[in-house]
Image: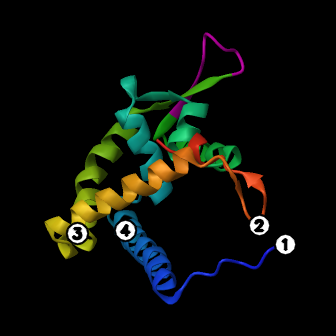
Amino acid sequence: MTDANWLDEREQRAWRGFLAVNAAVRGRVARQLQQETGLSSADYAVLVSLSEAPGGRLRVFQLRVAADWEKTRLTHQITRMTARGLVAREPCADDPRGAFVVLTEAGWDAITAAAPRHVEHVRRWFFDALGPEHVDALIEINETVTRHLLTASEPCSPCDVPSSCGDVLP
């Protein structure tokens, strides 16, 4: 095994800063949304995916890809949301083993009420701190890293496991 290619001080600062900003902004937005609407960030993620899908419905596997969650986590989340009346499960006529997750009227009401608050918080805690040049730079960074992940097929040293990142990115 070779020596690690450690991050230099500048790279370490950039990486840790990215992690800290991501966690801080997501945490603040999630806390405020929970306080104001009663929706967790997981609830919100599911509701957004369903609200953007045709007819407010997705197959479970499609929702899992959209949320980028493990199957077990999604199953538990859907169960909790079903109990609260935000979503419903419907059988899939084409695939007896499959099911749809469908946004209920209560789910539509919840996402319709929460979305303006969510965007208000994202704007306040993230975009209000940035100028147009920062937003452009962030777009470029995101697109560059996403392209890199989508084309990465070599094993990641030191683990030697082929990358599957492209399977879950948009």
- Start-end of magenta stretch: 88-97
Marker disc for residue 62: none
Q: Is residue 73 magenta?
A: no
The local secondary structure at tag 2 comes to loop
The local secondary structure at tag 3 comes to helix
Image label count: 4
Q: Position of residue 61 (x, y in %)?
A: 61, 32
Query: Tag 3: residue type?
Result: His
Q: Position of residue 39 (x, y in %)?
A: 42, 57
Q: Name the outermost residue toward the top.
A: 94
The alpha-carbon separation of the residues under discs 1 and 2 comes to: 7 Å
Which residue is located at x 78 percent, y 57 percent?
160
Which residue is located at x 53 percent, y 37 percent?
63
User: Residue under circle 3?
Assistant: 134
Dot 1 and dot 2 residues touching (CB under 8 Å)? yes
60 relative position to 155: left or right:
left
The alpha-carbon separation of the residues under discs 4 and 1 comes to: 49 Å
The local secondary structure at tag 1 comes to loop
The alpha-carbon separation of the residues under discs 3 and 2 comes to: 34 Å
Q: Position of residue 30 (x, y in %)?
A: 40, 66
